[in-house]
Image: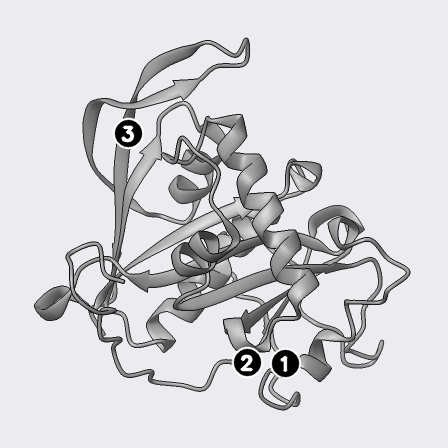
Amino acid sequence: MSPYGGSAVELPTPTHPLYPRFYTLPKNAGFITVLPLVYAEIPDHVVDHLHALFNDIVRDGRTYPQEEELTRQQFVDYFLSYNLFVGFYSPINLYFTVSHPPRRDSSATDPLDDGVPLVTSPPISPGFLSHYLNSNVPLEEVIAGMYYIKPNYPGRSSHCCNGGFIVDPRWRGKRVGITLGKSYLYFAPRLGYKHSVFNLVYVSNVASIRVWDQLQFIPSGIIPKAGRLKTADGKGEDQEATGAQWNDDE
């Protein structure tokens, strides 16, 4: 459902098919493949894991505005109802031979490096997920983060998208966040969006602000006392929030 009432907002027309993007983490820390997914393709136990991860972030009370945990259906409606992207970790290179390696991650010098396309793969299907969903490996060791892309406004402004990002706390500090951010800059225009607007980026979320600064987002303003967030000691305090945007003028 749209936050503006009525049915779901109409999506823009995609400009390209969506294929996974393959990224090398710095310092030989492994690889992230960002998979575009839709709800119907995701196994139930993976949805359950993503739901639990989201509620962990809500309970933490420091980055998302929700004060109450979401039911599974509420989570599906909020996070999985449009386009979902999941960052899957692998310690080894699953796709490229030594003679045809992916480009090394160049985030130190080029924060807009957008990875390597896996164009030889078929359209995303449950079978493709089997690369990552070995029953012997816990999902928290495979799923490093996730984000959605959906319209920020209805109708005449539905070409402006919004993204909601989560990095599993166990994966923080490994540059997973900026890797997901790079993939967002790649995928959003290919979904047909012309602009991106982040409504709430709390100023206390230093890691998030650092990512969007590095990716050359434009701060669009400060909203004083925009959130009743928890602090590290568990007490709440007001926080300011900033919006950010990019423009695709091509």
Please give left or right for residue 172 compared with residue 90 in the image: left
Pointer 2: what residue? 19
Q: Would residue 25 be found to the left or right of residue 235 on screen?
A: right
Which residue is rendered at x = 18% and y = 59% of the image? Answer: 153
| Mark 1 / mark 3, whichever is N-terminal | 1
Q: Are marks 1 and 2 in contact (CB under 8 Å)?
A: yes
Circle 1 residues within 10 Å: few <14, some 14–19, many ≥20: some
* Residue that appears at 15% across and 59% down: 5
* Displayed quadrant of residue 225: top left
When asked about the image quadrant of residue 150, the answer is: bottom left
| Residue found at the very far right of the displayed protein | 136
Residue pointed to by mark 1: 118
Q: Which residue is drawn at 77% across and 75% down?
A: 130
Q: Nearer the viewer, residue 54 or 223?
A: 54
In the structure shown, which secondary structural element does the residue marked by tag 1 occupy? loop
Answer whether labels 2 and 3 touch (C-beta < 8 Å): no
> Mark 3 highlights which residue?
241
Measure the C-alpha gap from mark 1 to mark 2: 6 Å
Relative to 176, is 150 above or below?
below
Marks 1 and 3, how far apart at CA: 36 Å
What residue is at 66 percent from the left and 70 percent from the top?
Answer: 43
Tell me which numbered mark, 2 or 3, is placed earlier along the sequence: 2
Q: In which quarter of the image is residue 46?
A: bottom right
Disc 2 element: loop
**Where is the C terminus found, in terms of image quarters?**
bottom left
Q: Which amino acid does label 2 sit on?
A: Tyr
The percent coordinates of residue 202 (x first, y second) are 35, 29
Which of the marked residues, 1 or 2, is nearer the chain's N terminus?
2
